[in-house]
Image (tube, helix red, strand yellow):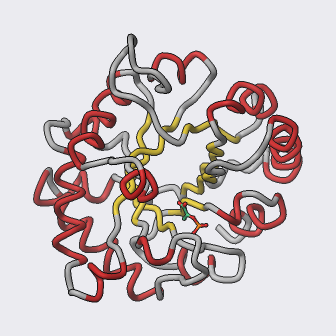
C-alpha cells in the first residue's frame, strides 16, 4: 500500500503567542482542508494550546517538539506525554539534532521518549541523521543504523508502525544546503534496510520516512518524487504560510 505523504512544520523556538496565533490562522485558511497529505505543525510548548484551538476542525494536526519520558514529578522544566495529550497533541518530535547537539539527547533518551510517547497513544517523529564530519568520514550508514536501532530498541512492530522517521542530515538543517535527491533517497533506502533487519519487510514498507534539511518550495518536488521519501520535516519554511503551502501543494 502506498504510504501517504506527511509534512510537519517544526517551528523551533520561534513565535510569541500572537505570532503563533496569526501563523496558525493563516495555515488553516491556506491548507486546513487538505486531506491527500497529512499535515502537522509543532509550535513551542507555550503556544500548543492556542494553536490547537485554532486548528481544531481543520485537517492540520498538532505536534510538540520534545517530551520527557517520566509521567510526572520533580523534573523542573520538563513536559510529560499526558500534558501534551491534554492540549490536543498528536505527534511528538524526538531526537532532533538540535536536542542531540545542545541538550544531551542520546540514543537511549530517544528510545525512552519514543516508548513513553507510544504508551500514551501519541505518535513519535524520530529524527536521525549524520553530521558533516560523519558524512565526510563515510560514516552515514554506521550513524543511521546506530540511531535507528537505538530508537526502536524494545518497541514492538505494531508500535513501530505508528512512528515516523525523519532523516535529517545535520549539515542540511537551517543551512540552505539540501541533500541531493540521490543522497536523500540512498539514505532513506538504507534506513528502510535497517528497519527490515530490526523487524521485517512489512514494517519497512509501512513506516514513513520524512526528509528534513532546508526543504523549500523550490526543491520539494524533486525530493518528494523519490520512491522512499514520504514527506518532510520543515524548519525555516514552516514559519511562513506561503512557504509551507508551497511545500504541501506539490504533494
Ligand atoms: C528541522 O529543524 O527539522 C529542519 C529541517 O530545519 P530547516 O528546514 O530549517 O533546515
Q: Quadrant of ligand 1?
A: bottom right
Query: For this rendering, which residue is in front, 170 or 221?
Result: 170
| Numbered label tally | 0
**Quarter of the image with the C terminus in it:** bottom right
User: Where residue 247 appears, x then y in whole percent?
Assistant: 69, 68
- Quarter of the rendering containing residue 236: bottom right
User: Where residue 129 appears, x then y in whole percent?
Assistant: 35, 67
Seen as rendered, the residue at the extreme left is 197
Identify which residue is drawn at 45% across, 77% down: 171
User: Where residue 51 appears, x then y in whole percent?
Assistant: 75, 33
- 120 to the left or right of 27: left
Identify which residue is drawn at 21% across, 86% down: 138
Figure check: 11 above or below 86: below
Identify which residue is drawn at 28% across, 35% down: 159
User: Where residue 187 appears, x then y in whole percent?
Assistant: 32, 76
Query: For this rendering, which residue is in front, 105 or 162?
Result: 105
- Quarter of the rendering containing residue 146: bottom left
Figure check: 109 above or below 81: below
Residue 1 seen from this side: no
**Quarter of the image with the N terminus in it:** bottom left
Residue 44 seen from this side: yes
Figure check: 211 above or below 9: below
Amino acid at each position: 500500500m502506498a504510504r501517504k505523504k506527511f509534512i510537519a512544520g517544526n517551528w523551533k523556538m520561534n513565535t510569541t503567542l500572537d505570532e503563533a496565533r496569526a501563523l496558525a490562522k493563516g495555515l488553516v485558511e491556506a491548507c486546513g482542508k487538505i486531506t491527500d497529505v497529512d499535515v502537522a505543525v509543532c509550535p513551542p510548548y507555550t503556544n500548543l494550546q492556542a494553536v490547537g484551538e485554532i486548528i481544531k476542525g481543520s485537517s492540520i494536526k498538532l505536534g510538540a517538539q520534545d517530551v520527557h519520558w517520566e509521567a510526572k514529578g520533580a523534573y523542573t522544566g520538563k513536559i510529560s506525554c499526558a500534558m501534551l495529550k491534554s492540549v490536543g497533541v498528536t505527534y511528538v518530535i524526538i531526537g532532533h539534532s538540535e536536542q542531540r547537539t545542545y541538550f544531551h539527547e542520546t540514543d537511549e533518551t530517544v528510545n525512552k521518549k519514543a516508548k513513553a510517547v507510544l504508551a500514551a497513544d501519541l505518535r513519535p517523529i524520530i529524527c536521525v541523521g549524520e553530521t558533516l564530519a560523519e558524512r565526510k568520514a563515510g560514516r552515514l550508514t554506521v550513524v543511521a543504523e546506530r540511531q535507528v536501532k537505538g530508537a526502536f530498541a524494545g518497541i514492538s512492530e505494531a508500535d513501530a508502525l505508528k512512528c515516523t522517521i525523519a532523516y535529517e542530515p545535520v549539515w542540511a538543517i537551517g543551512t540552505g544546503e539540501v541533500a541531493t535527491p540521490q543522497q536523500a533517497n540512498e539514505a532513506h533506502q538504507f534506513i528502510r534496510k535497517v528497519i527490515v533487519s530490526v523487524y521485517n519487510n512489512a514494517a519497512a514498507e509501512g513506516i514513513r520516512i520524512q526528509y528534513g534539511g532546508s526543504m523549500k518550495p523550490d526543491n520539494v518536488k524533486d525530493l518528494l518524487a523519490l520512491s522512499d521519501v514520504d514527506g518532510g520535516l520543515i524548519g525555516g519554511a514552516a514559519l511562513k504560510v506561503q512557504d509551507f503551502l508551497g511545500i504541501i501543494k506539490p504533494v
